[in-house]
Image (tube, rainbow, N blue to C red):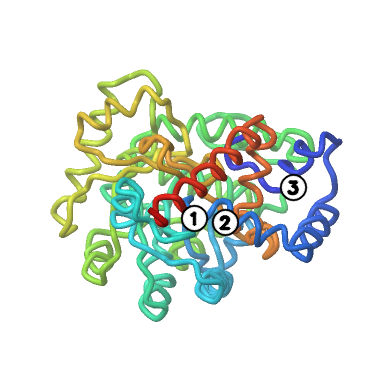
């Protein structure tokens, strides 16, 4: 259920066919009005909330992928909600130390951003400074080494933007009817481009854009789909933003330990001259991971790793499988509140058959705490 949205989880929880998003949101509003959100927040108060963002929209990217590129206005709105509702926003390192020692403030929250998109510097950094919040940015470094638009995302954007009905793709991939073969055409282009060296990959993008009738010059002028360079990353570090590991190629194998070690080593090699703190926290690219990789990461002096599995983090949560709340343009205010209050976490406990094994333990623990305080 990686990255699952509240609507899908509620439908599974209720044991019904998928409901419309508007019906799910209505249900959540009712739960909030009945005070269930407040109860859920109290029950889950010891859970660490880690929010996952990616980049900030520079132009119209939020219409293309609203979870990947959040609007600055929506990000501000989320932070204002967290502050007004009393969610302590902590640095990742501090929050994990508190979780390890049992001194985590109630409903403690961490804000993370994946990939190192350029918009985090051009749009996000002024906002982060103004709001005075700690943020961890997990940076992948292949496109720092090879400055160009990120191939896979840019190519998808070209197919999203095109108004053409047919396309003759470069590199002899053939002609495709985009009314019926758009997915096939994009998959063929993605596979071909992924095998090319950087310079040829960039040229492939230019030719694909021309074939699809999309201005690649405009993409380059607006600096869309680029990651930060070393100077911009250094500015983030100097501003107090916590830069951490996210692999070099944004490619993560499940069972190739040597490749895992290489990805971490290359990632560190690029980032160590830039940052002023240890690079010992990690985010799995695309949420791909295996629990067995915790031992591998520990041997590489990595202290934690975040996933995109939905949920909160407790003392028992594996530190190399930390859960996160993925936020973005498709997530409504009420859905975000349902996650932050822990209501959706209780839904997940129910679905996993853990609800009634967890709640009695919490009641016993609370009773024990009161006895200790009285003694």
Q: For label 2, count other residues whose C-alpha is less than 10 Å away and answer few (under 14), some (14-19) or many (20+).
A: many
- Callout 1–callout 2 Cβ contact below 8 Å: yes
In the rendered image, which residue does mark 2 sit on?
327
Determine whether label 3 and label 1 are within 8 Å by CB.
no
Q: Secondary structure beneath disc 1?
A: strand
Q: Earlier in the sequence, mark 3 or mark 2?
A: 3
Q: Pinpoint residue 97: horizontal percent, then vertical percent.
A: 29, 51
> Which quarter of the image is occupied by the N terminus?
top right
Q: Position of residue 246 (x, y in %)?
A: 34, 44
Quarter holding residue 93: bottom left
Percent position (x, y) of residue 165?
75, 45
Q: Is residue 121 above or below residue 204?
A: below
Query: Most extreme residue toward the front, as rendered?
Result: 375
Identify the residue position indicated by label 1 in the image. Answer: 51
Q: Nearer the viewer, residue 178 or 78?
A: 78
Q: Nearer the viewer, mark 1 or mark 2?
A: 1
Disc nearer the start of the sequence (3/1): 3
> Looking at this view, is 344 or 66 the one in front?
344
First reached walking from the N terminus: tag 1 or tag 2? 1
State the mark number for residue 128: none
On the image, the x and y values in percent for residue 190 come to: 52, 35
Q: How far apart are the alpha carbons under marks 1 and 2?
A: 7 Å
Q: Is residue 214 visible?
A: no
Q: Is residue 117 above or below residue 123?
A: above
Q: Quadrant of residue 298?
A: top left
Crowd band around label 3 with a 10 angstrom C-alpha radius: few (<14), some (14–19), many (20+):
many
In space, the residues marked 3 and 2 are separated at their CA atoms by 14 Å
Name the residue tied to disc 3: 7
Please tell me which residue is depicted at 35% across the width and 66% down the height of the picture: 134
Residue depicted at 68% across the width and 36% down the height = 350
The answer, for residue 192, to whether it is visible in the render is: yes
């Amino acid at each position: 259920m990686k990255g699952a949205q509240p609507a899908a989880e509620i439908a599974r929880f209720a044991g019904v066919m998928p409901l419309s998003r508007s019906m799910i949101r209505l249900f959540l509003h009712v739960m909030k009005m009945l005070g269930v959100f407040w109860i859920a927040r109290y029950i889950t108060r010891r859970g660490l909330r880690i929010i996952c963002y990616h980049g900030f929209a520079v132009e119209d990217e939020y219409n293309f992928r609203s979870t990947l590129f959040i609007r600055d206005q929506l990000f501000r709105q989320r932070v204002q909600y967290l502050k007004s509702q009393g969610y302590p926003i902590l640095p990742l390192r501090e929050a994990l130390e508190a979780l390890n020692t049992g001194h985590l403030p109630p409903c403690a929250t961490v804000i993370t951003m994946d990939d190192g998109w350029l918009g985090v510097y051009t749009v996000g950094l002024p906002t982060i400074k103004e709001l005075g919040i700690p943020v961890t940015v997990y940076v992948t470094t292949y496109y720092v080494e090879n400055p160009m638009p990120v191939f896979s995302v840019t190519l998808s954007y070209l197919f999203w933007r095109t108004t053409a009905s047919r396309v003759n793709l470069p590199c002899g991939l053939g002609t495709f009817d985009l009314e019926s073969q758009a997915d096939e055409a994009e998959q063929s282009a993605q596979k071909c481009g992924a095998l090319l060296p950087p310079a040829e990959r960039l040229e492939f993008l230019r030719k694909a854009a021309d074939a699809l009738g999309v201005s690649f010059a405009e993409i380059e002028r607006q600096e869309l789909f680029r990651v930060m360079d070393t100077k911009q990353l250094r500015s983030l570090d100097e501003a107090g933003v916590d830069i951490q590991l996210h692999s070099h190629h944004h490619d993560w194998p499940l069972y190739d330990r040597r490749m895992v070690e290489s990805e971490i080593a290359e990632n560190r090699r690029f980032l160590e001259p830039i940052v002023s703190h240890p690079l010992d926290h990690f985010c799995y690219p695309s949420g791909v991971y295996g629990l067995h990789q915790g031992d591998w990461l520990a041997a590489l002096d990595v202290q934690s790793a975040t996933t995109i599995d939905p949920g909160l983090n407790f003392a028992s949560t594996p530190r190399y499988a930390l859960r996160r709340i993925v936020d973005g343009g498709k997530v409504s205010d009420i859905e975000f509140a349902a996650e932050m209050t822990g209501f959706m976490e209780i839904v997940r406990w129910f679905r996993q058959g853990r609800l009634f094994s967890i709640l009695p333990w919490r009641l016993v623990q609370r009773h024990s705490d009161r006895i200790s305080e009285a003694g």
